[in-house]
Image: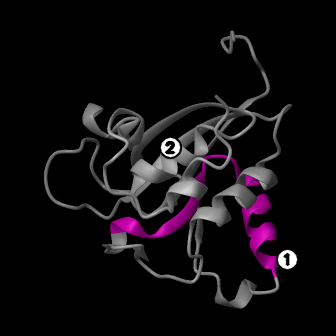
Amino acid sequence: MNTLHNTNLETVYFAGGCLWGVQEFIKHLPGVVGTEAGRANGTSNNTIGEYDGYAECVRVVFDAAKVELNSLIEYFFEIIDPYSINKQGDDIGPKYRTAIYSKQQTHLTIAQDYINQRDDAAKVVVEVQPLINYVASDPEHQDRLTNFPDDYCHIPHDLLYKYKMD
């Protein structure tokens, strides 16, 4: 598929605990044309050194003519515990917080509206913030569960591949 001239492409960043599982799940969703594991909203421009405030995330490029952001957010909520602060599965710490980041205000409004319309909105602790910094993860973290399917993942296996088309 030639995405070079596709004007419907948009980008959003999902943080949902360890990025390995989030990337593996999201890359199989309808309308997603590309993913990249990375770090959002830290203070460094590289992956060297100590934790700098980032959240592990997945950069998601999607075709807005094929899938609405609201649908992607709904899928995302299938794989996270939206009530958990700085923890998903066995992964604990601020870098495992749940969040939706974007450079587009319309994306942030859609995400906040999605949360606000939920019956449990008062309990949801998913950050919705502008993306201020993004750094791609090192190569060994890209498509990690595709390359090493037996590695740890906090997302149950049947859910992880729920939307995978063979």
Give the total number of marks visible in the rendering: 2
Residue 54: x, y in percent?
Answer: 35, 59
For residue 24, above or below residue 159: above
**Gap between marks 2 and 1, in whole Å?**
27 Å
Q: Which residue is mark 1?
A: 117
Cβ–Cβ under 8 Å for marks 2 and 1:
no
Q: Residue at x 72, y 51 (%)?
A: 72
Q: Is residue 152 visible?
A: yes
Magenta span has 112?
yes
Q: For residue 140, what is the image quadrant? A: top left
Q: Is residue 29 left or right of residue 55?
A: right
Identified by mark 1, the residue type is Gln
Q: Position of residue 135 (x, y in %)?
A: 36, 41
Query: Does the stretch in magenta take in 9?
Result: no
Q: Position of residue 44 (x, y in %)?
A: 27, 49
Is 132 situated above or below 11? Answer: below
> Which corner quadrant holds the C terminus?
top right
Residue 155 x/y as whole percent: 49, 61
The chosen color scheme is one colour
| SS for dot 2 | helix
Q: Residues within 10 Å of mark 1 (few under 14, many from 20)?
A: few
Q: Residues in magenta? A: 95-118
Q: Which residue is mark 2?
A: 24
Q: Which three-letter amino acid code belongs to the residue tagged 2?
A: Glu
